[in-house]
Image (spheres, coloured by chain):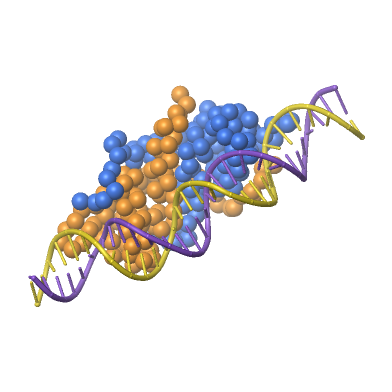
Chain colours: A orange, B blue, C purple, D yellow
Amino acid sequence: MPASRTTSQKRAAVIKALAHPSRLLIAEALLQGERCVCDLQELVGADMSTVSKHLSLMRSAGVLACEKRGLNIYYRLACVCFADFLQCVDQMTPARPRRKSCC
Amino acid sequence: MPASRTTSQKRAAVIKALAHPSRLLIAEALLQGERCVCDLQELVGADMSTVSKHLSLMRSAGVLACEKRGLNIYYRLACVCFADFLQCVDQMTPARPRRKSCC
DNA sequence: CATTTATTTGGCGAAATAGCCAAATAAAAA
DNA sequence: TTTTTATTTGGCTATTTCGCCAAATAAATG
C-alpha cells in the first residue's frame, strides 16, 4: 500500500537528521562505539556549539542516544541498523555524477 | 576503517535527496512502478514546477531515472535498494517522540 | 564556596532550500 | 505550420538551516 503523507513526514525527519556531511561523519564514527562531544568536535573540526547542536538534533530525531558520566556526555547510535542504512545508501550512491536534466 | 569527509559528503548528498516529505512520498510511490510528472503532481499536490524541481534534484543525485515517451516523462527509482533503505529508516524511526536534551 | 572543565542554549547574520508564477521548450495533434 | 499538452527553467520572496560567538548550566575539583 502507498505511504501516507504523515508516514513520509516521520520518515523524512529521521532521514533529514542524517542528511548533513558533519552529522553523517559523526554517526559513522559512532559505529566504532560511543564518543564524548569533545572527541566528535575534533573529528568534525567545527565550533563545539555547532557540534552540540548537530548532536541534539540527531538525538531528538531518535538516531542517537547519550549518557552523562562525570563531566562528559557520551553519544552513541540509538540503533544498530544504521550500519544497514549506510549500506543501502552506498548502493544508491552513483559512481559517476549525473546530469541535471533527463533524456 | 572510519569514513573520510569526502565519502560522508557523497553519501549525504544521496540522503539529502530523500530527506524531504514530498520527495520521499514520490520515491515511495515509485515503488509501485514508474509514473509521469503529472501523476506525481497530483500525488504531492504542489505546483508542477515544484514537483519537477524535486524530481530533477533526485535525478541528479542518482536516486531516480527517467525516460521520455511521447509528451510524458516517466520517472522511476534508479535502484531497487530503495526498499531496503526504507526498511532501515523505519527501524530507526522512534515510536514516541524524543526530548531535545540528553539526560 | 570558588574555579575549572565539558557541554548546551540563545541570538544573530549568512547561506541554502522551498515553492509559486511566468516564460521557455519540445513533442504531438490539428 | 499553428496549437495544444507536458514538462523544465528562471526569477523572486519566504522560510529554514548553518555556524559562529557569548552567555548559561552542571558536575568535579581545589
Looking at the image, residue A103 sits to the left or right of residue A50; the answer is: right
Q: With B91 as the anchor, is B8 left or right in this view?
A: right
**Residue under the point 32% across and 59% down:** A52
The C terminus of chain A: image quadrant: top right
The residue lying at 43 percent from left, 40 percent from top is A12
**Percent of width and height locating residue A100:** 64, 48
Q: Nearer the viewer, residue B78 or D10?
A: D10
Q: Quadrant of residue A23?
A: bottom left
Image spot of residue A54 (x, y percent): 36, 55
* Above or below, A39 relative to B44: below
Is residue B41 at least partly visible in the picture? yes
Q: Is residue D23 above or below residue D16?
A: below
Q: Residue drawn 23% across and 57% down?
A: A74
User: Is residue A87 in view?
Assistant: no
Vertical comparison of A16 with D18: above or below? above
Using the image, determine if residue C3 lies above or below residue B102: below
Q: Residue at x 40, y 54 (%)?
A: A24
Where in the figure is residue A62, as x and y percent of width and height? 31, 44
The front one of B22 and B8 is B22
